[in-house]
Image: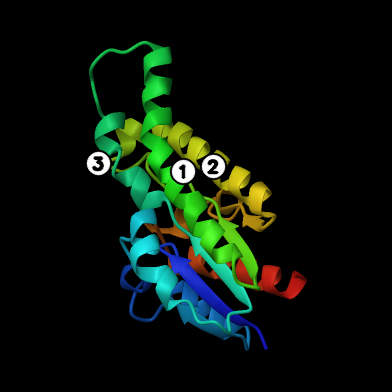
Amino acid sequence: MAYVSLLGDSIIDNKVYVQPHELSVKEHLEEQSEYMFKQLAVDGHTTSDVLSFQLDKLPKLSTHKVLSIGGNDLLGQIYFLKNKEEFTVKEVMEQAVCKLAPIKDRYRTIVQNLSQQDSKILLCTVYEGNLLDDSLYSDIAFASQAMVSMLNDIIFSTAATYKVDVLELRNIFTKPEDYANPIEPSHKGGKKLASGIIEWVKSV
């Protein structure tokens, strides 16, 4: 029997964003399989929170671990994307790399810790969100894709270093109805994510 620990943020802990008659990601996982699931993911958490609050709660009997984190770290950089000062492309790229550097260090530390246990690991990339039609985010919708891509490069690089698997959420959350709001998974999106996780558990 697989015992799957779920770490991260609201991409997994999305219960508050779905309607009362709809299912969260964890509920979809439980409905689609007979595996055991331990939810450590917490809505609003960042890489710092995973290091401080989630890793110590990992059950030793976990056979599989799923990590979906980083989106809230990027949300903390909204002021950077909304900055109206004029910079050269070189300056903007250098600033972006500098802002992602501490996130990269924390992310790699998380995966290093997860790798110390004898279990399978799945890292989820960060999706782009449904930002174009939202008044708060529409002006940074395209710029945010660049930041997401840079963060996902960190995720893929980390996965290669520690020889773990990656689930590409940008290939799962492809339609507006996959989102409950501009940045959270809906019932439909959560079902697709749960299916992707279960397929991975079956394959490893």
- Residue plotted at (28% across, 44% down): 76
Label 2, on which residue? 154
| Distance in Å between CA atoms under marks 3 and 1 | 26 Å
Q: Residue 112 in the image: state x and y as whole percent.
A: 55, 57
Cα–Cα gap, marks 3 and 2: 27 Å
Near mark 1 (Cα within 10 A), the count class, few <14, some 14-19 or many ≥20, is some
Q: Position of residue 43 (x, y in %)?
A: 33, 65
Q: Nearer the viewer, mark 3 or mark 1?
A: 1
Task: Pinpoint residue 123: horizontal percent, then vertical percent.
Answer: 57, 58
Q: Pointer 3: what residue?
A: 136
CA separation in Å, label 2 and label 1: 6 Å
- Residue type (three-letter) at the residue carrying disc 2: Ile
Quarter that holds the C terminus: bottom right
Tag 1 or tag 2, which sits nearer the N-term?
A: 1
Secondary structure beneath disc 3? Answer: loop
Can residue 13 be seen in this snapshot? no
Q: Quadrant of residue 141?
A: top left
